[in-house]
Image: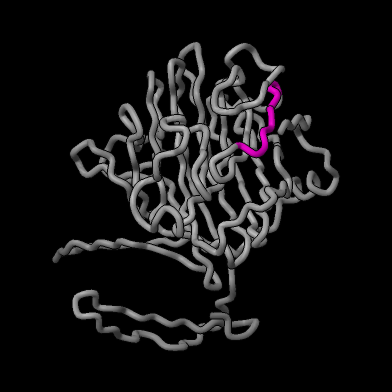
Amino acid sequence: TQNDPTSSNVNVVVQNLVDGSAAIVAQDINVPGLVPYQGRIAFNGRTGGANQTAMIDNVSESVDGNVTLFEDFEDQNIGNNLPQIVGGSSFTAHTIVGDGPGIVSQGGDFGVHPAFMRLAKEAQSQAGSIIFDDALPSDSGPIDVNFQIRGLNENTNRADGTSMLLVPTAIHGETGRLPDLQTGVAAEEPDLAGSLGVAFDTFNNDTGGNGELPEPNTPVNVGNNIALHWDGSMVAQFNLELDDLDLVNNEFNDVNIQVEDTGTDLIVTVVITDGTDGSIHLPFVAHVIPGATFGGSDVRLAFAARTGGAFDNYDIDTVNARAGIIPEPTSAMAMLLVSGAFAIRRRRVG
């Protein structure tokens, strides 16, 4: 806790989970020069001539009392060639159909390696989901979600897409997997009661499937839109020009989603940064969904993806979410928001 402009106080409490007792290791210890700064949480362990097993689990963080989630899906190879998650916020994975989600490691030797979560692999009829176990409060200020998303096309077709959801615990519970979507296995159509979904759709179903609207500027069966879903229905769709931003560009694209629950409406902003050229795209800016509210319920963050008769790899990485704290925009994004000179031509339907 910051004590004054030049120092902070530190408190350390250790609780024995066996008998529930607690020991105050440090109480209001003043550290001169310790002032707020941006940083990353880290842990370390060591053995020497003597040895023991040192483990950590259930890591959570709060800033000014606001809950945060972080997961970069790093894995550790301990010799059995099965990637094991290292650190991060806990989540529950679920196979909707096919082989389901899984960690893809970028390393092979012993130790910790970069990795990512593959929600659906490039094969016919695959679908998977993950949902974080810790919930974010919806009534303590805006919810800020950041993640990386990739559609990786290694064949000649593309389908079907990825989605992000905020799922209220008051309706769907505080534990367990992502509930079945109202669209069944269609994970790119995040229709779920009382929930907000953001869809990244790569297959054109405008012939009557899933309530999508036409995309006149894409080839037959090629979808390239971002849509907002609320309480089981699509409420807005933004058609992306393929030349501006292709959702299947084989690169990780940075996504930022901000959601504010006013108690009567949801206000949603979606920003996506193209992984191929760094251009910033704003399909939805302070978009109001009238009558939408989580009703004060906490929400769990979830992701899902699917393939069908056509298919790609659908991956996510570097998930970071927090409630009650909205970061200052970068100078480039601030200029876009103020001037309205968006990096893509605005083509919204619905």
Q: Is residue 92 above or below residue 16?
A: above
Q: Is residue 53 above or below residue 32?
A: above
Q: In which quarter of the image is the C terminus?
A: top right
Residue located at (64% from left, 62% from top) = 263
Residue located at (35% from left, 55% from top) = 175
Quarter holding residue 126: top left
Whether residue 315 is visible? no
What kind of secondary structure does the magenta stretch mostly adopt?
Answer: strand
- Total residue callouts: 0
- Asked whether residue 334 is drawn in magenta, I would say no
Q: Is 166 placed left or right of 244 in the picture?
A: left
Q: Give the range drawn in magenta.
A: 234-243
**Horizontal and vertical percent position of residue 81:** 22, 36
Q: Is 24 placed left or right of 164 in the picture?
A: left
**Horizontal and vertical percent position of residue 8:** 54, 82
**Horizontal and vertical percent position of residue 110:** 26, 42
- Asked whether residue 241 is drawn in magenta, I would say yes
Residue located at (46% from left, 37% from top) = 182
Which color scheme does this rendered protein use?
A: one colour
Choose between 59 and 51: the one closer to the eye. 59
Q: Residue furthest right?
A: 339
Quarter holding residue 118: top left
Choose between 18 and 202: the one closer to the eye. 202
Q: Is 239 placed left or right of 275 in the picture?
A: right
Residue located at (65% from left, 39% from top) = 235
**Horizontal and vertical percent position of residue 211:** 59, 28
